[in-house]
Image: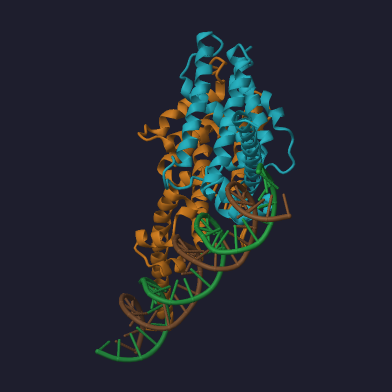
Chain colours: A cyan, B orange, C brown, D green
DNA sequence: TGGCAATCTGAATATACATTCATTTATTGA
DNA sequence: TCAATAAATGAATGTATATTCAGATTGCCA
């Protein structure tokens, strides 16, 4: 076995180790999400997460440097996943109304597939500034701003193409985000759940035409 | 001094004491609201509230049986105040669109006058079931349901009078509440604040006519 | 197989607060 | 003024739990 081979094998081993590490890490994140969703950040103990995930308390600290780090990671990783997914789905549409429909659809689909995550997200459990890394709240606000900006772009291009009424994009974007959050919240707290997807046409129609106006193609 | 007079004086004294008690209690609630708003339920200590309100820690327990009780009281008293105020303002209007305009106006006015309270409210900081009294979360959800029901009634009567498009009132009510929450949230987190009231016509127009539809008188 | 390194473990530690209660202080009426 | 009652105080208590770390366990290669 020459040096070259040894190095290749070592890299293979290291890669496998890393994969396994990431799997265990992901498993913890998944379990933690469910517990945080159910009982909130402060209502959840590291001991609970340890027990539920089948690790010892101390082991959690090999994957995350603190409870706060674990919590932040649960949220920020999903936030990025969600944004990526939505932008993908939206980009497949050509027209502005088509993009908006896709956005609502994709947003609701994500809510439905990540119930726990949204329960956490809608709680805005701040967690203090604290040490070093940007506070979670700042990250979440920045993400929200990004998302709003993205929606504004869709609206602005829709106006340019004459598909939407000319108006200030910012309030229009806010209105859409608010409506989606309200429907998502309602679905989250509902005991016997119909699919959230059935609300997509409803939200779309209300957003396009309002409660007074008649259908406009 | 006969017995009658003595009793009257005692009652007068007791009333005065009660008034003073309530004043001190209200002062604590007011201070606590600000601190809870800034740092959240778990980030706030009884010691802080005591110092800020000029009482000793122990004294707080003469007014509230626990930290949780204090927190619940901060929220529930304002929630009821808000509902009462909004219903008053809305009842002065005759038509359904007029009532909706009044509702948005009154809602935003309350947000603006009670910034701290809304910061707390939008956080949905649950607090566990715990002992005896209905959990705060349940109370808040019930209140939300009430509010939605109230909006639905306005919408339904508007349909009956031909002032609004015929449709399911529930999603229409959800949409309005969601839009108001989104605008309120945006105002709360904005650093340099224009008045939230300037958004009233904007929300109203979007809610009535949507982003596509043309003005409908 | 043996021994080294990496990983895991959970009892022990340290800290942070909510709450209590023995004292102190203020208020009242004779 | 003086007891007696009420109210206020904050140091001390008890509890909960995040984090650590010395030792146990596992996986790895010769």
- Direction from residue B123 to residue C10 in the image, left or right: right
Q: Nearer the viewer, residue B141 or A9?
A: A9
Q: Is residue B41 above or below residue A26?
A: below
Disc tally is 0
- Direction from residue C27 to residue A86 in the image, left or right: right
Q: Nearer the viewer, residue A151 or C13?
A: C13
Residue D24 drawn at (x, y percent): 65, 61
- Quarter of the image that includes the N terminus of chain B: bottom left
Q: Nearer the viewer, residue B55 or A47?
A: A47
Q: Residue at x 68, y 34 (%)?
A: A112
- Quarter of the image that includes the C terminus of chain B: top right
Q: Is residue B135 above or below residue A84?
A: below
Q: Residue at x 50, y 31 (%)?
A: A144
Res. A213 in view = no
Q: Is residue B195 above or below residue B215?
A: below
Q: Is residue A171 above or below residue C19?
A: above
Q: Residue at x 58, y 26 (%)?
A: A84
Residue B177 drawn at (x, y percent): 56, 35
Q: Residue at x 47, y 35 (%)?
A: A141
Residue B107 drawn at (x, y percent): 49, 38
Residue with the most extreme top position: A161
Res. A187 in view = yes
Residue B157 drawn at (x, y percent): 63, 32
């Amino acid at each position: 076995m020459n040096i070259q081979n040894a190095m290749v094998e070592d890299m293979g081993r290291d890669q496998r180790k890393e994969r396994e590490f990431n799997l265990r890490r992901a498993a913890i994140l998944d379990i933690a999400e469910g517990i945080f969703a159910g009982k909130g950040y402060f209502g959840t103990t590291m001991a609970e997460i340890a027990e539920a995930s089948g690790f010892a308390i101390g082991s959690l600290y090999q994957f995350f440097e603190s409870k706060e780090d674990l919590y932040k990671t649960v949220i920020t990783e999903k936030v990025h996943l969600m944004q990526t997914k939505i932008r993908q789905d939206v980009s497949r549409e050509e027209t502005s109304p088509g993009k908006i429909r896709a956005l609502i659809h994709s947003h609701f689909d994500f809510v439905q597939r990540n119930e726990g995550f949204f329960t956490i997200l809608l709680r805005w459990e701040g967690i203090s500034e604290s040490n070093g890394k940007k506070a979670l709240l700042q990250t979440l606000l920045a993400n929200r701003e990004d998302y709003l900006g993205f929606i504004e772009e869709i609206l602005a291009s829709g106006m340019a193409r004459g598909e939407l009424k000319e108006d200030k994009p910012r309030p229009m974007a806010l209105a859409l985000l608010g409506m989606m959050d309200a429907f998502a919240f309602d679905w989250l707290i509902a005991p016997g759940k119909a699919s959230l997807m059935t609300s997509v046409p409803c939200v779309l129609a209300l957003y396009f035409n309002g409660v007074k106006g008649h259908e406009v193609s």
